[in-house]
Image (cartoon, rainbow, N blue to C red):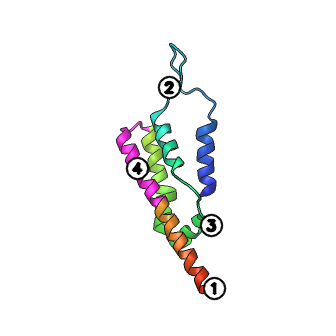
Amino acid sequence: MGRYLGLARRALESSQRALPYERNEINEKRVTDPYQELVRSTLAKVSDQPVGMVPWLRQSRPMLYEELVVKLPDKIHRLWVGQAPLAEFQRILDLWLEAYRASCEVYRGASAGQREEGE
C-alpha cells in the first residue's frame, strides 16, 4: 500500500501538463482542480503505513483489502472522471481514509499479538 500511496502522491505532485482546469486562457492564472485538492488533503492525513500491511490484509482480511485497494479507489476514480458533486466525492474519500485507518489498526493489533506469542 505504501508503494501505491507514493505513486499517487508523485502523480499528483509531478503532473507537468496544463490541464483545462489548471490554466485560465484569459489571464494564465493557475486554477486548481477541486478533486485534486480533496485527494491531496486526504493523502496528507495518511501517515506511517505499517510495512507488510497490504499483503497481510490480502491474506487475512480479504474484504477489508478489497474495500481499501480495489472498490473505493475505483469509485474515487469514477467520481473524479465523472465530475461528481464534491460532497459525494469527499464522502468516498472519507470512507477510504476510514478503511485505511481501520486497516492500520487491525494490522498493528495482529502484529502485536504475534510478537506477544513469540515471547
- Above or below residue 25? Residue 34 is below
CB-based contact (under 8 Å), mark 3 and mark 1: no
How crowded is the residue under tag 3: few (<14 C-alpha within 10 Å), some, or many (20+)?
few
Q: Secondary structure at mark 4?
A: helix
Image position of 89 (left or right of 40): left
Q: Secondary structure at mark 3?
A: loop
Which mark is drawn over residue 31? 2
Q: Secondary structure at mark 1?
A: helix
Among the two numbered marks 1 and 4 on one chain, the one whose residue lies closer to the N terminus: 4
Three-letter code for the amino acid on which mark 2 is drawn: Val
CB-based contact (under 8 Å), mark 3 and mark 4: no
Disc 2 from disc 3: Cα separation: 38 Å
Q: What are the residue bounds of the magenta stretch?
A: 82-100
- Where's the N terminus, which quadrant? bottom right
In this rendering, the label closer to the viewer, 1 or 4: 1
Disc 3 from disc 4: Cα separation: 25 Å
Three-letter code for the amino acid on which mark 3 is drawn: Gly
Q: Which percent across, then down, holds residue 29?
A: 53, 20
Q: Which percent across, then down, holds residue 84?
A: 38, 39
